[in-house]
Amino acid sequence: MSSADKENFNADELVAPAWLNTQFLEQVLIEYGKTPELRVVDVKISPASAKGDHYASIMFRANVSYTTKTGDHSKSLIIKTMPDQEGHKKDMIGSSNIFVTEIGMYTKALPKFEEMLREVGDNTKLFVPCIYHSLEPRQVMIFEDLVPQGYSVVRSRNPTVTELKIAFQKLAKWHACSFKVLNEQPDFLQEFKYGLFTMHSVLEDTYFNSGMGTFIELLEEVPELRKYVPYFSKIKADYVQQMRAIMQEYYESRKPNGYYVLGHCDFHARNMMYKHNEDGGVEDVMLLDFQISNICPITTDIIYSVYMLMGPEERHNNYKELLDYYFAEFLATLQKIGYKGELPSLVEFWKLISQHKIYDFFLISTFLPMMGCLQLKDFDPAELMQSEEARKPLYRLESYIKDIKFLLARYEEHGYFE
């Protein structure tokens, strides 16, 4: 791999760990295919994704050539494991439950939801099969690679409205199934309680706590935005705690009309892969990365998607249409799968979005600046996560300031600052 190529990948994914070898992969394929005679003859390992696609785990692609009684074969696999290198990433997630959660999603929750859909004639595929998983002696998950099946990540552009709608449709079906299960079999999903804001290392991380201060500095610099400084200064001290309270509401202070679901909780463009036909039409989207999925208000994925999935044009001009589309699909699926309770209300849904405005404020002040550089090649996500000084220039990008001017005016119109 050339030095130029190396710049396109995360540094900790350039060299595979020693245990990720021919013997290990051979045993995985033997167990998966129940083919004791299988022998691996060649393995080529490379980084599985581009720099900026993800941060928490380490991912590799293994192109495996092997033989069985039926002849010569090859398979491309995606291997996901915990970071080995000492540093910020390992400190933040090394002792977390993210692999326990994701294994549970692939082996219990999502298969249950697909089964519910199949029973009513809906063949929607909610996840790619996990062919191997373990927690000991190391935390590992292995999947069949979607790239040879025609799927790809949208990187050099923002998703189109059509692409957004198919992603929202799939999320709505998942949410609806989980909503029904939570209301009818609440104990079934109780293990999914470890979200981003249950991780003390995250709550104490400077990245999650410094964004509001840098955001306020920007507001003070831009004359037409100075009027918002008093409001954001007032919430600066406890906005992370307020947000944690919303995220943990199901467990700590459940509301009668909370509309709780098992959320994806990291519903952004790099956590999905699209399949297009020869004419460029969208055939399917596969949602990925369920490491922080947990039971939360329905608004968690929805508010997040406005900033982390939509581009500025869709965020400004199409967001209400898209969120209404999501909710219509959510209701339609609830009815289709035979939910017997009172159906959620669109009016209440939008009330919840307004009530959970603190999440908007966190996202625009902390996560949204990072989104401005994802389509650039000359950035290092690890450096941005770890250095407040490295992040500050992102708040001065013309595109970000333009976005903020529009969003704050919309919040003001909606009464968010009252």
Image (tube, helix red, strand yellow):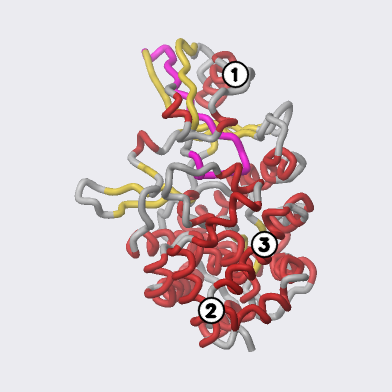
Query: Residue 198: where, in percent of width, then height?
Result: 75, 56
Residue type at the position of mark 3:
Ile
Residue identifier under label 1: 24
Looking at the rendered structure, the secondary structure element under dot 3 is strand
> Magenta part of the protein: which range?
51-71
* Residue 96: percent from left, percent from top: 74, 45
Vertical position of residue 415 compared to residue 295: above or below: below
Up-down: is 198 above or below 81?
below
Is residue 131 visible in the rendered structure shown here? no
Residue at far left of view? 279
Element on which disc 2 rests: helix
Identify the residue position indicated by label 2 in the image. Answer: 223
Q: Looking at the image, how many numbered discs can be counted on the residues?
A: 3
Q: Earlier in the sequence, mark 1 or mark 2?
A: 1
Q: Residue at x 25, y 54 (%)?
A: 281
- The image's mark for residue 90 is none
**Front tag of 3 and 2:** 2
